[in-house]
Image: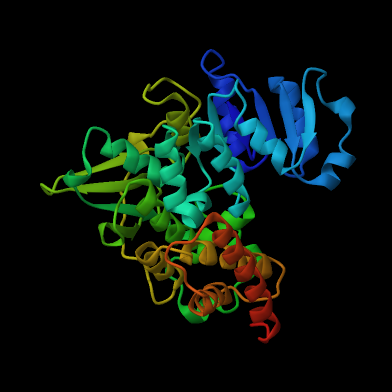
Amino acid sequence: MAVLGCTGSIGTSALDVAAALPDRIQIVGLCANSRWELLAEQCRRFRPRVAVLTDRAAFELADRTQFPRETELLHGDDSCCDLAAAADVDVVLAAVVGAAGLRGTMAALEAGKTVALANKETLVVGGPRVTELAAKRNAAILPVDSEHSAIFQALTGYAAADVARVVLTASGGPFRGKTAADLEAVTPGQALRHPTWQMGPKITVDSATLMNKALEVIEARWLFGLTAEQIDVIVHPESVVHSFVEFADASVLAQLSPPDMRLPIQFALTYPDRVPGPAKKLDWKALAALHFEQPDRGTFAALDLGFEVARRGGTCGAVLNAANEAAVDGFLGRQMGFPDIARCCRAVLDAHDYDPAPTLAGLLAADRWARQEVARWTRTRSPSR
């Protein structure tokens, strides 16, 4: 296995799984952006053939003596793609955050690898192209997101015609039950305190705005060949039920487990086998109740953007994803308020020059334009606080 994004929360959890299953998983290569100290520690632990730092400044700063002799330290996105396509790699765990993960995933699929996909943005930005490439190269895409893993597990053995709809569960984030007025004064520190999951800052903010669920709607549309009308979202604060599938006969199947990403990661890496691993087990004696409620779409406006993009396709995914990444950066940098994230994404999506069938170059151009438009939008507005 090669792990792209090895120093993030998904990457480190994947390495926990690899350490627990040494007879099944060998780490061939690791790729990180800039955290060279943690990368070196991981290399000393797993002794991979290759380690990659995509950030040049980090590559130049890295102390080569901290890496084992048998590990070759390389630099840049091209080296990351070379690792993803390497002959001695069977499975690529794609866990790079954001649109930056698209190139590595595409390189792995082009080489016919099995991709354990944690980077939802890959399908948000380039859904049709990614799935077409996977089919052309006979490469498998196995979902790592807990919600999509749950759907994948429930769908096993069934055809598309059997499915009435899928329902993605959402924790509701730290601001469940808050009003729109409450959210105007939210600080980055408050948004980063998720009640259930331990994640990186970008996805934690996405969970707080419900943009993560909007992106997951788009991902589910392409991953499972669904229409937007076949996808729904329900808030489930315990994060024990990870998603539902409702079938044509009205039967509903759900997948339950504690909120531990190591389980969906392991399922993708060992599929179709189920073996003991490091994930927590559900404590049925402590499970008193499960709660469900409808999302507040008026307060959390980001969610509807996901359904709109899932319906329209084309350049919409690239624009929404890029706008959101840039807006989250702006919020964390205190350049815009928390509700401004969804407002800005709406404005940029509405203003973009829609192309229903973009080339890869067109998707990348739409990504660049959206980021520039967020910067312009931010300059022309007064800060919310």
Q: Residue furthest top?
A: 23
Where 55 falls versus 357 (above or below)? above
Colour scheme of the rendered structure = rainbow
Residue displayed at 38% across by 72% down: 297
Using the image as rendered, state which of residue 367 and residue 179 is in the foreground.
367
Where 3 falls versus 366 (above or below)? above
Tally of numbered discs:
0
Using the image as rendered, state which of residue 19 and residue 109 is in the foreground.
109
Q: Is residue 261 visible?
A: no
Image side of residue 64 versus residue 3, left or right = right
Q: Position of residue 70 (x, y in %)?
A: 78, 17
Q: Quadrant of residue 264?
A: top left
Q: Position of residue 362 (x, y in %)?
A: 55, 62
Q: Position of residue 229 (x, y in %)?
A: 26, 62
Where 36 falls versus 312 (above or below)? above
Using the image as rendered, state which of residue 346 and residue 279 is in the foreground.
346
